[in-house]
């Protein structure tokens, strides 16, 4: 799984992962109503966000090589977890006031690694202020 953005004020991470990683680590953390809505999310995703043009824009904007299966916003303590569309962190959607900051792509193998993780962007540590 890859961390591709960070919310410093909320100490939360935007993480892209495979279907298997989602099922193992993140879906169990979801609130029941979000779990119930997941099939609809995937249906809408296929209809609206699976085009090559969309994927190209996401990859260029997020500075990644390929899109992940699903994206989650996850807090460091794992108490907050929700999925959303891949372009959720784009500052244009937040009237240029996005709480997300780009960070260097960080590969992790388990969400427990978030506990001690210090995200950086171009080598500079991003702080949660």
Image (cartoon, grey):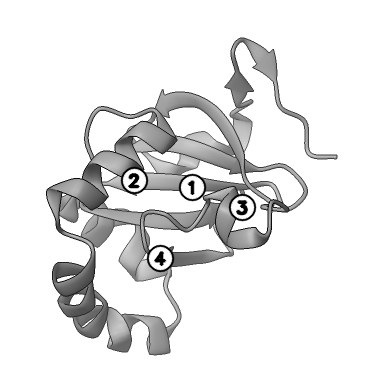
| 49, 5: nearer the viewer | 49
Q: Residue at x 40, y 89 (%)?
A: 33
Q: Which quarter of the rendered picture does the C terminus lie within?
A: top right
Q: Residue at x 41, y 45 (%)?
A: 15
| 108, 93: nearer the viewer | 93
User: Which element type, helix, strand or loop, lies under badge 2?
Assistant: strand
Q: Residue at x 40, y 65 (%)?
A: 83
Residue topped by disc 1: 14
Circles 1 and 2, Cβ within 8 Å, touching? The answer is: yes
The relative height of residue 37 versus residue 110 in the rendered view (above or below) is: below
Neighbor class of circle 1 (other Cα within 10 Å; few <14, some 14-19, many 20+) is many
| Distance CA(mark 4)–CA(mark 1) | 10 Å
Residue 107 is marked as none
| Distance CA(mark 1)–CA(mark 3) | 14 Å
Residue topped by disc 4: 84
Residue 16 is marked as 2
Task: Tell me which label, 4 or 1, sits earlier in the chain.
Answer: 1
Q: Residue 99 placed where, x, y %?
A: 69, 51
| Distance CA(mark 3)–CA(mark 2) | 18 Å
Task: Tell me which label, 1 or 3, sits earlier in the chain.
Answer: 1
């Amino acid at each position: 799984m890859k961390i591709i953005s960070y919310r410093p004020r909320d100490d939360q991470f935007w993480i892209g992962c495979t279907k298997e990683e989602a099922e193992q680590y993140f879906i169990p953390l979801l609130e029941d109503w979000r779990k119930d809505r997941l099939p609809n999310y995937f249906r809408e995703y296929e209809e609206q966000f699976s085009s090559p043009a969309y994927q190209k824009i996401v990859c260029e904007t997020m500075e990644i090589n390929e899109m992940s299966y699903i994206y989650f916003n996850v807090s460091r303590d794992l108490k907050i977890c929700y999925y959303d569309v891949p372009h959720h962190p784009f500052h244009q959607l937040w009237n240029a006031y996005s709480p997300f900051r780009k960070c260097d792509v960080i590969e992790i193998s388990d969400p427990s690694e978030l506990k001690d993780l210090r995200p950086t962007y171009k080598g500079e540590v991003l702080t949660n202020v």
